[in-house]
Structures are given as C-alpha cells and as structure tokens.
C-alpha cells in the first residue's frame, strides 16, 4: 500500500484511539478533538490505504480485517516512537522531556496533589495524567502509553514491577440514618440483607469486593452498577443502598457527616497503593525520579489524608485548624481539619486557632457552645492522609459530581 508512506503519526494516533474504543465519540473525547475532525482523519487514512478500516452497523463500530491488521502495525509504530521519546528524554535528564502517569480512578483524589508537588520541584518537565479504571490502566501499560501507573496490584498476565508506597483501606459506607449506622459491631452476615451499589467490572474496587466476600462465602445483593465513585457516594447519601469503597475517596463526606463507615467485622480490607511499570521498561531519569518521589512523598501524604472520624482501625485526622460549624440550633467546635466547602444546610467558619474560635463563640453570647476541642494524634503508620495548604495545591477532593470518564490532565513545562 504505497499510499501509507504519506500517513502522519497523528493519523495513526487517531486511528488507534478509534480502534481501541470502537467509538468515534469516545476517541474524540480522549484526544480532545471534535468528532468531525476524527472522522475526517479516518477518511483520509482509508483513502491512503485504499481499503475500509471500519464497518458501521447501526450505531456500533467494528474493525474490518484490514483495520485490525493496520491497528497491529500502528501499535508497533507508536510504541517505537514512545521508546525514542524515552531515550531522548533520558539524554535531557530532569531538565526537559515528558512524563505520562496513569492512575486508577480511585487515586484521582490524591494523585493531582502529588503531581503538583512534583511539578514544583521539576518545573521543566511536561507531565500528563491519565485517569481510568484498573483494566484500562493495565492496557495502557501493556501498550506502553504510560511511563508509570499508580494503582493496586497489576495483572498477573503482564510482567510488571510494583513498588508499594502506602496502605489502601476499603470500607463499607452507608447513609447516617441507615439502621446499621449506630451499631458498634456488625457481623458480615448482616450485609447479605443489604442492597449494594458497586463499581463496574474491571474496577480494582469491584475485584477486591468480590474477592473479599467470596472468600468468606457471603452473598451480597447488587442493586446497581455505577462507574463513578462520586455518583456512588451520591446514591448512598440518597439512601439507595450501601457500598464497598475506598476510604481515600470519602474524607469530605465523613467530615460533614453525610456518610458513615459501617463497623463491619473484618473491615477495612487493607490493600496497597503501588507505583507500577513494565518489567522490560527502562525508566528515564524523570520516571525514576517520580517513582522515588512517590515512594517517599506519596506515603507521607496518604498518612495524613483527611478521612473524617476514624474509629478503631486508624487514628483521627491530624489536628490542624479550629473549625466552627453551624448545622442546627448550636455550634460545634472541633480541632480537626475539614476542607473548604460547607455541607448542604450548614455554614463553616475557618479559624487559624481553636482558641480564637472558642472566644468568638463566647463573645457572641447567644450561641450555644456544644462541643469541646478534640485532638487525637495519628498512629505512626496510619493511611489517613491530610489536605495540605498552598496555592499550588490541587483541591483533589472537590465536592463535584465527577463521572468516571477517561480523563487526562497535562502540566506543561515552565521556563525556557
């Protein structure tokens, strides 16, 4: 096919995205292009090849035999270009180059904060963050589309190196008004009577849940599958059921008492957060530096990540700010960190010093001081992470309903 000599790398990237997703619309979202632009590039590629690469049946898209063959070679070409980029990046060291990080959707709550911290230390590196579920991130590793992944354990079918950097607790959550919410000890068998709202197949959280209940011969009733942690939390807050979810995703909801963790025997399930890369991949200086950064800074951040009230298994969040909350007839003063952004029907006043907050209440006279400053030093190895201040920090757990879609974030290099 002599016409393919004029094919551009960009056309191969667009073709590979459509072939991988079997969807023009999803490819346009992934590549930040309009759907007509994607269709035009595919049409030009088909004209160059002299063969149809896709077959459309109704609203579904399929690869033709020619398309499947071209996809195989396109992966080889794009993989070779990525390897060349890595080699050139290694020559530049930490003064330039590009680093692509893939993270599972549950890690999106803290990964942007870590990338911001890393970017402050290495402003000339161009960083790209890809967010998807576990299965998709594994596929990105296999296709050499990302340098490193932040996830749990990788697939046994892919030869990888996984370096653990922090504990990852998984818990069962419910609405505060749920009948089990006030019980101090809940047998696992009680969960068989509950309706579970679960993540989609391919999610690491879903796999961990199924493995945990299967090993204990507990049959749970699945009422709904949702491919977004945020939407799952909203459904639980609406009283639609309970959910098995990462504790690192629910800090705001616990702190504002919109959700509770059920005290179930055998929970939390403790997993590990890991930095993962292919065993055969030669890490560039930038990738190796980021890996070492995650092993140190990632562990420290997740030890302090805000998780609200933690009973039994882990310590309460690190005392940082006096928080005066009005959520009814009186005020409660709690010496704990609560992120900006009040819960519905409540007001939050932030004070640097708990003493100032207390004096404010006393001076007001007509307010009711209905609480005392509570402090609890965290355990040395707790995984409860804390929000850190700073203008460069991301609000990694902004209370915005964010559906799970393949998402990318790019931090471009600064300076010359």
Image (cartoon, rainbow, N blue to C red):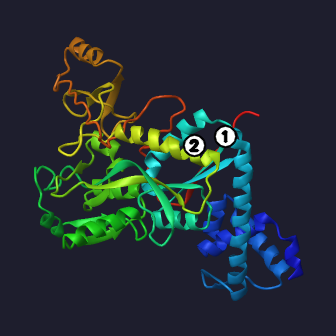
Residue 150 visible? The answer is yes
The tag on residue 18 is none
The reply to whether residue 54 is in sight is no
Of the two numbered discs 2 and 1 on the same chain, state the one appearing first in sequence. Answer: 1
* Residue of label 1: 94
Relative image position of residue 152 (x, y in whole percent): 41, 58
Camera-nearest residue between 217 and 37: 217
Q: Where is residue 87 in the image (x, y as percent from the top left)?
A: 72, 53
Please tell me which residue is depicted at 60% across the width and 60% down the height of the picture. Answer: 281
Q: Quadrant of the C terminus?
A: top right
Residue 302 point in image, percent of width and height: 38, 42
Quadrant holding the N terminus: bottom right
Cβ–Cβ below 8 Å for labels 2 and 1? Answer: yes
Front residue of 384/280: it is 280
Question: Does residue 147 sit above or below 51 in this rendering?
Answer: above
Residue at image point 30% right, 35% down: 346
The residue that label 2 is drawn on is: 289
**Cα distance between the residues tagged 2 and 1:** 8 Å
User: Viewed as shown, does residue 193 lie left or right of 3?
Assistant: left
Look at the numbered disc 1 and give the secondary structure of its residue.
Answer: helix
């Amino acid at each position: 096919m002599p016409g393919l000599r004029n094919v551009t790398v960009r056309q191969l990237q667009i073709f590979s995205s459509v072939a991988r997703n079997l969807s023009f619309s999803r490819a346009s979202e992934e590549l930040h292009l309009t759907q007509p632009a994607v269709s035009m590039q595919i049409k030009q590629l088909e004209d160059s090849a002299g063969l149809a690469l896709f077959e459309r049946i109704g609203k579904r898209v399929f690869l033709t035999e020619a398309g499947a063959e071209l996809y195989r070679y396109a992966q080889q070409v794009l993989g070779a270009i990525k390897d060349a980029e890595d080699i050139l990046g290694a020559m530049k060291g930490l003064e330039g180059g590009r680093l692509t990080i893939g993270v599972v959707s549950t890690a999106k709550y803290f990964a942007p904060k870590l990338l911001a911290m890393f970017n402050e230390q290495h402003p000339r590196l161009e960083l790209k963050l890809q967010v998807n579920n576990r299965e998709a991130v594994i596929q990105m590793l296999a296709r050499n589309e990302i340098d490193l992944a932040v996830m749990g354990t990788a697939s046994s079918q892919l030869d990888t190196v996984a370096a653990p950097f922090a504990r990852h607790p998984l818990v069962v959550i419910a609405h505060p008004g749920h009948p089990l919410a006030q019980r101090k000890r809940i047998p696992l068998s009680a969960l068989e009577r509950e309706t579970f709202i679960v993540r989609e197949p391919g999610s690491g959280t879903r796999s961990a849940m199924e493995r945990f209940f299967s090993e204990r011969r507990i049959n749970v009733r699945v009422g709904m599958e949702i491919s977004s942690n945020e939407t799952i939390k909203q459904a639980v807050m609406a009283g639609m059921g309970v959910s098995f979810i990462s504790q690192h995703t629910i800090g705001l909801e616990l702190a504002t008492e919109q959700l509770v963790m059920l005290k179930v025997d055998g929970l939390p399930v403790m997993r590990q957060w890991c930095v993962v890369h292919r065993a055969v991949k030669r890490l560039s200086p930038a990738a190796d530096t980021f890996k070492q950064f995650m092993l140190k800074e990632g562990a420290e951040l997740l030890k302090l990540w805000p998780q609200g009230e933690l009973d039994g298994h882990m310590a309460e969040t690190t005392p940082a700010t006096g928080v005066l909350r009005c959520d009814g007839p009186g005020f409660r003063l709690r010496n704990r960190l609560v992120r900006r952004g009040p819960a519905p029907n409540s007001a939050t006043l932030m004070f640097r010093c708990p003493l100032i907050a207390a004096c404010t209440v006393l001076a007001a006279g007509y307010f009711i001081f209905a609480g005392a400053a509570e402090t609890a030093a965290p355990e040395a190895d707790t995984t409860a992470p804390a929000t850190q201040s700073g203008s460069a920090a991301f609000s990694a757990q902004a209370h915005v309903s964010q559906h799970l879609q393949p998402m990318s974030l790019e931090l471009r290099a600064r300076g010359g």
